[in-house]
Amino acid sequence: METRRKSSIGRPRGFDTEEALERAMRVFWEQGYEGASLADLTNAMGITRTSMYAAFGNKEDLFRKALERYTEGPASYADRAQREPTARQVATAFLNGSVRATTRPGCPAGCFGVQGSLAAGDPGRSARDALIAWRNEGTLRLCGRFQRAIDEGDLPPDTDPELLARYLMTVANGIAVQAASGATRDELQQVADMALRSWPPA
């Protein structure tokens, strides 16, 4: 009983943590790590700073949890694309997913993982490093999938899987930047279609 009493005092749970994390994710997505103040975050989450620290840790901890939520939610298309049977279908699902995720109605435009900390100074260095690692991991996963396609004879044996993965990630990141700049879903879909018109790229 004493343990439960201390837990309820030290870690108040008079709110939906999943909903609060969803709202924090959207704040970081729209404003970036440094642009999102603690007041912005707690106001959006509908909780006090004490409750935020108790439930999620400090701002950096919250950012990492929000990135995990983004990966499992809006950016989950990347994992699904990996399961497509051919390299071309992987690339198609990846770019089409990028277009949809960065232009979702009711969500910030662009990609949390691209613009969340591009211009971070020293206070945002850890967030910037987390996003660099996140993007690099995505590239490595694509590289591994394309290497498998080469091994299975789906891609030509002289294909460079790392270069192909970086090409696809660069197009997707560009789509995200353009979406944040106001490009429409139809416009960005045309970009994705153009990138896929010649596959694999020479």
Image (spheres, rainbow, N blue to C red):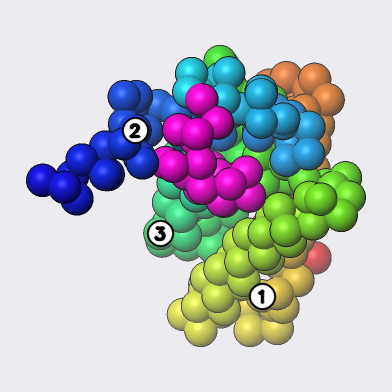
Q: Earlier in the sequence, mark 3 or mark 2?
A: 2
Alpha carbons under labels 3 and 2: distance apart = 40 Å
- Which quadrant would the C terminus be assigned to in this image? bottom right
Quadrant of the rendered image containing residue 162 = bottom right
Magenta segment includes 54: yes
Residue located farthest toward the left when viewing the structure as drawn: 1
Is 20 on the left-hand or right-hand side of 177?
A: left
Magenta segment includes 64: yes
Residue designated by label 1: 161
Residue located farthest toward the top when viewing the structure as drawn: 106
Residue designated by label 2: 12
Numbered label attached to residue 83: 3
Disc 2 on helix, strand or loop? loop
Is 87 on the left-hand or right-hand side of 80?
A: right
Residue type, numbered disc 1 = Pro
Horizontal and vertical percent for residue 15? Answer: 34, 24
Horizontal and vertical percent for residue 75? Answer: 53, 43
Q: Residue at x 35, y 40 (%)?
A: 11
Residue type, numbered disc 3 = Arg
For the record, the magenta segment spans: 48-66
Residue 191 in view of the camera: no
Alpha carbons under labels 3 and 1: distance apart = 17 Å
Residue 117 in view of the camera: yes
**Between marks 2 and 1 in the image, the one whose residue lies nearer the viewer:** 2
**Depth check: 191 or 71 in front?**
71
Horizontal and vertical percent for residue 125? Answer: 79, 57
Alpha carbons under labels 2 and 1: distance apart = 49 Å
